[in-house]
Every structure is written in C-alpha cells, then in structure tokens.
Image (cartoon, rainbow, N blue to C red):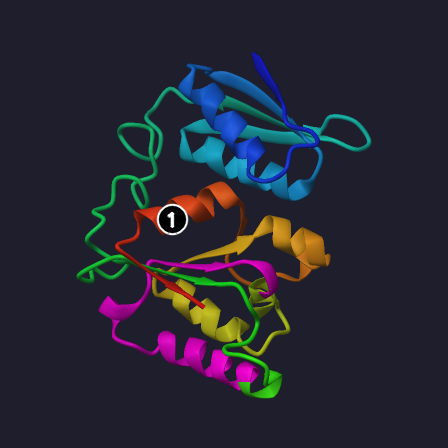
Amino acid sequence: MQTVDARGKMCPQPVIMTKKAIEAGASEIKVIVDNAIAGQNVTRLLKSKGFEVVLEAENDLDIAVTGVRGEGPSEGEDGTNPTEDTQERSHGPSGGSKAIAVIITKDILGGADRDLGEILIKGFLGTLHQLDDELIPETLAFMNEGVRLALKDSSTCESIIELEKKGCRILVCGTCVNHFGIADQVGVGEISNMFDISEAMLKADSILSL
C-alpha cells in the first residue's frame, strides 16, 4: 500500500498528491491529512476514481483516508466522473448551448454601499434559479467572503439550494471557510478545494466573476 503524507500541506496539495499517486498506478493508497476538509476532498477524489474508501483516526490529530481500487470501472469508463470529465463541454446541466461557470468572491454585489450590495446579491441569486433551465450555470463557486452566501442562516442559502436542485454544481472553498471558522455552518454544496474549483472554471465555455 502506498502512503501519501499530506499533513501540513495547503489546499489543494493533498488532492494533487493523491491524484499523482493514482496516476502512477497505485491501487491501494493511504493518505494522511491533518484536517477534516482535506479528508473530505481526498475521499471525494478517490471515490470518483473507483476506490472503496475508509476514514479513520491516524492519531489524536490526524486523519487517515485509505482507498482500495474496486474491481469494476470507476464512475466513467476511463476512471473519470461522467458528470464532469466525460460530459460534453458544450452542454450545461440542463442541456444548454454552452457551459457557464460563475465565481463569487464577495458576499455583496457592487461597491461601497454594503446594504445595497446585500440586496443586489440576494436578488441576483434569487433570479438565477428562476431562469430557464438552459441558462442555469453548470458550476457556481464561492471563494473568499463569498462563502458566507452559502451558510445555513444566510438570506441566499435557499436560492443556492434551488440552483443545486436544477443541476448546478455548488463548490464552496474549503480554505476560505476554515479561515473564517465557519466550516460547520455551510448549508449547501460541497466544501471543495482550489484544484476542483480551478478545473471547473477552466472547463467552462464562459466564466462570470462577481
């Protein structure tokens, strides 16, 4: 079994180190990380590549993610996730004409007037999920202060949940929620990493940044 020691590594290094081990041919792998979000990200990657995964405490501080590749194919015939890697890039979640990704880095929309900015971002997300299906973004990523929009008690959480129901992939920056100490308050989407967010943005045909 190959061991990957990713303790002390910043996002998205644990995922990248695990991905390299898989690409090198590892069929049994143990990844040691020092925080729960890294464990979740590594687990998601291993499962997407066809591994059976077990999480356990390595010691009082660290987490061991152990993966054994199953006998059958992973989620895609070539070991990729069909909803991401093998999906036609020219189609959004509802078969639209092109894949659109939206990245939001602030919890308001606009400039200095915070009260107005809160109204505008709430209105934007509230309108977005009511658009025709072909206009729904393929990915909606939240980074920096923008992660606050995905919290359970935010006025925008319900709108983001509706977008997710329509097939929009919701990515919430794990480094950001850790920085603000709000990881346990996220109410929608998946707590993700820079690797997944960058990949989603680069695969899109168009990117809207707010």
Q: Which residue is mark 1?
A: 200
The span picked out in magenta is 117-145
Q: Which residue is farthest front?
A: 112
Q: Position of residue 157 (x, y in %)?
A: 54, 71
Residue 69 in view (yes/no): no
| Label 1: which secondary element | helix
Residue 132 lies left or right of residue 16; in this view the side is left
Query: How many discs appear?
Result: 1
Residue depicted at x 45% and y 68%: 210
Viewer-proximal residue, 209 or 74?
209
Magenta residue check for 123: yes
The image quarter containing residue 87 is top left
Badge 1: few (under 14), some or many (20 or more) residues near its Cα, within 10 Å?
Answer: many
Q: Is residue 106 above or below residue 131?
A: above
Residue 32 at x, y percent in the picture = 66, 26
Q: Is residue 92 left or right of residue 19?
A: left
Name which residue type carries label 1.
Answer: Ala
In the rendered image, residue 96, in percent from the top left (x then y), is placed at: 20, 62
Horizontal and vertical percent position of residue 128: 37, 75
Query: Residue at the spot x=33%, y=33% of the render?
Result: 80
Mark yes or no: residue 90 visible.
yes
Residue at far right of view:
60
Front residue of 99 and 31: 99
Q: Is residue 168 left or right of residue 67?
A: left
Question: Which residue is drawn at the image coordinates 26% and 69% (left, top)?
Answer: 135
Residue 204 on the magenta span: no
In the rendered image, the quadrant that contains the N terminus is top right
Relative height, residue 141 to residue 63 (above, below) = below
